[in-house]
Amino acid sequence: MKIVFVILVALVIVWGALVTALLVVRPKGTRVGEAVRLLPDTLRLVARLSKDQSLPLRVRVRVWLLLVYLASPIDLVPDFVPVIGYADDAIVTYLVLRSVIHAAGPDLVTEHWPGSPETLAALRSLLRIQDDD
């Protein structure tokens, strides 16, 4: 019984550390609501990136892992938790998209973006993508 308790405490500590890490790496000054507003177009962007054969395999693997994480019912912060339940999805998506853009270039987002120019501008702002990168 004591071992089960120790394992549960360890899992809670690891979970707390992961949630704290997500909060630390989230984009500064960004509200979760901004990211949620872009969600439908961002999901289509990620799906298009996952199929882009011109991307290096290591980059596409990151995108595929993101899709698996987003589809998974297991999250770092359960989705039923008000407000922050979807924050981990938004933060992980932010981190993966930043790494994909760093590896493949900022024009990639423009090429695959399914939404309007206004929502693309909002995404570029959220991801801190400069036009002259």
Image (tube, grey):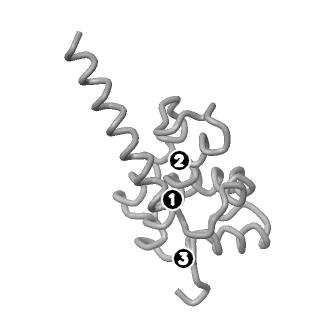
Query: Circles 3 and 1: CB distance less than 8 Å?
Result: no
Residue 71 found in image quarter? top right
Towards the viewer: 105 or 84: 84
Dot 3 crowding, Cα within 10 Å, few <14, some 14–19, many 20+ = some
What amino acid is labelled 3 in the image? Pro
Q: Residue at x 45, y 60 (%)?
A: 24
Circle 1 residues within 10 Å: few <14, some 14–19, many ≥20 = some
Q: Is residue 100 above or below residue 72?
A: below
Q: Is residue 110 left or right of residue 62?
A: right
**Label 2 or label 3, whichever comes before in sequence order:** 2
Q: Nearer the viewer, mark 2 or mark 1?
A: 2
Say what amino acid the circle numbered 2 marks.
Asp
> Is residue 83 found left or right of 96 in the rendered image?
right
Q: CA distance from mark 3 to mark 1?
A: 15 Å
Residue type, label 1: Asp
Where does the image place residue 86, in percent across and percent down from the top left? 61, 43
Answer whether labels 2 and 1 touch (C-beta < 8 Å): no
Q: Is residue 105 above or below residue 60?
A: below
Element type at mark 2: helix
Name the disc covering residue 88, or none: 2
User: Is label 3 in a helix, a strand or a loop?
Assistant: loop
Of the pair 102 and 122, the residue shown nearer to us: 122
Circle number at residue 106:
3
Residue found 42% across the figure and 55% down from its top: 60
Nearer-the-camera pick, 106 or 95: 95
**Where does residue 131 sit, x and y in percent of width and height?**
61, 85
Task: State the residue position of label 1.
Answer: 52
Q: Residue at x 43, y 73 (%)?
A: 102
* Distance in Å between CA atoms under marks 2 and 1: 25 Å
